[in-house]
Image (cartoon, helix red, strand yellow):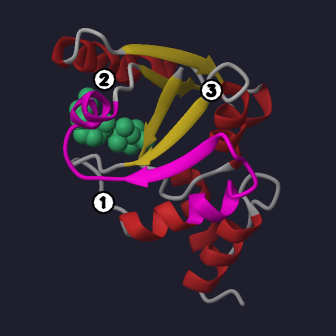
Amino acid sequence: MKAIYPGSFDPITNGHIDVIERASNFFDEIIVATLCNSNKKYLFSSEERKKLIDIALSHHSKISVVSFEGLLIDYMKDQNIKAIVKGLRTVTDYGYEAQMALTNKKLYEEAETFFMHSQEKYSFLSSSLVKEVYSHKGDLLEYVPDNVDKALKELYGMT
Ligand code: PNS
């Protein structure tokens, strides 16, 4: 079965990658969808965010990356995808994620959301935190893929 893993990924972190890799043990194919949340402003364009993920996950044959505008469920219907994978770090993620899962279910009855708990070592990690640290010229080498570390350092004039 195919599953879609949607998110903003601004930028992707090792916490996201860990969920994607563990989910790929349970699904035949994982499609990572780089989308836009209309309430958020992004540091990287959707093309840049997709490219960073493409490079970070290029060695995985079961994982592909897409980017599109519009509703997630429209893409899922079009591509005959019924499973959504989302990661949960702490209880504070649950309210927001449950709201999205229930909205997607309301819009597309056949859609099922599968939640995966993040590993403890990534439970504090977020793309926002990564941007905050790099914007002050720090780094989080253990928590972002090498190409993301490089992109952030270039952006913040650290090279
Ligand atoms: O990583 P994020 O920002 O929490 O991801 C949210 C995202 C991008 C997955 C969500 O906003 C989304 O699915 N956007 C696409 C448009 C859509 O389908 N919205 C309704 C879903 S509730």
* Res 130 quadrant in image: bottom right
Please check the rendered image and state whether residue 70 is part of the magenta-colored stretch, yes or no.
yes
Toward the top, the furthest residue is 109
Decide if ligand 1 comes within 8 Å of the CB at mark 2.
yes
Please check the rendered image and state whether residue 62 is part of the magenta-colored stretch, yes or no.
yes
Q: Mark 3: which amino acid?
A: Asp
First of labels 1, 3 by sequence position: 3
Q: CA distance from mark 1 to mark 2?
A: 19 Å
Marking on residue 41 = 1
The secondary structure type at the circle numbered 2 is: helix
**Residues at badges 3 and 2 in contact (C-beta under 8 Å)?**
no
Which of pointers 1 and 2 indicates the residue nearer the eye? 2
Q: Mark 1: which amino acid?
A: Lys
Which residues, given as a range, are shown in magenta? 52-79
Marking on residue 100 = 2
- Residue 125 in sight from this viewpoint: no
Q: Nearer the viewer, residue 94 or 7?
A: 7
- Residue 16 in sight from this viewpoint: yes
For this view, does 105 lie left or right of residue 67?
A: left
